[in-house]
Amino acid sequence: EPEVTQTPSHQVTQMGQEVILRCVPISNHLYFYWYRQILGQKVEFLVSFYNNEISEKSEIFDDQFSVERPDGSNFTLKIRSTKLEDSAMYFCASCNRDSIYEQYFGPGTRLTVT
Amino acid sequence: GQNIDQPTEMTATEGAIVQINCTYQTSGFNGLFWYQQHAGEAPTFLSYNVLDGLEEKGRFSSFLSRSKGYSYLLLKELQMKDSASYLCAVFDSGYSTLTFGKGTMLLVSP
């Protein structure tokens, strides 16, 4: 069964450094999402992406964040200058036009900012 | 604004039935989802309701009342592996996003 994959599974970085989190959505999916979950808290929407542009973004998704689909398979989230409070699990999700409401989540990247 | 409420924790016994409630107040509504999340793992899709009524899927059923802003997830014949967090989420058509509740941690004991 096709699945969303994410790399790395765990990233440790120092405050102020840039990180890029990578996702490979399911191949025939057209809608892509990033969510984050701070330990012990709820899953929070960051951004949605369709047709090579951002569709929606939350208040969390400020100028420090950017997304890109550099090729036909990868979908990346970049954090330019990480802060301690960026430490969280970051989930990528994707869905297709036929089942736009059923988002498939990747296993997540645990980001630890020290 | 967006507000989704569900109990923080519930406990139940193996083989029993448990109902997890969710109430929501959102600016737009285009469906309600239930996800299961085991500790340290990604949410996995369980069910989706867009119209009022009951949707049944094996041991899991989900109910929606749009007029009351209310849903529940019913789990039957509980198994130990059902111990997880259950997330209620609303698809907000106004924002085309999924808004999650804080989740209900279900502990199934022998």
Image (cartoon, coloured by chain):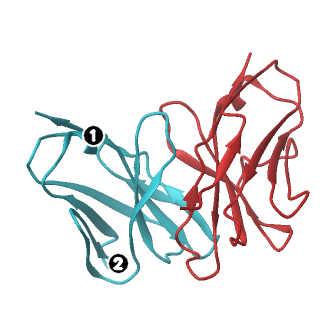
Q: CA distance from mark 1 to mark 2?
A: 28 Å
Q: Secondary structure at mark 2?
A: loop
The correct choice, above or below, for A100 with respect to B42 in the image is below
Q: Quadrant of residue B81?
A: top left
Chain letter corresponding to the colour red: A
In this rendering, position of residue B86 left or right of residue B101: left
* Residue at numbered disc 1: B83
Badges 1 and 2, same chain: yes
In this rendering, position of residue B79 left or right of residue A30: left
Q: Secondary structure at mark 1?
A: loop
- Of tags 1 and 2, the one toward the viewer is 1
Protein chain holding label 1: B
Q: Nearer the viewer, residue B28 or B71?
A: B71
- Ranked by sequence position, the earlier of labels 1 and 2 is 2
Picture quarter with the C terminus of chain B: top left
Q: Residue at x 45, y 54 (%)?
A: B44
Give the residue type that dot 2 points to: Arg
In this rendering, position of residue B28 left or right of residue B16: right
Q: Residue at x 59, y 57 (%)?
A: A3
* Residue at numbered disc 2: B66
The correct choice, above or below, for B63 with respect to A75 in the image is below
Chain B as rendered: colour: cyan
Q: Residue at x 56, y 62 (%)?
A: B98
* Residue A82 in sight in this render: yes
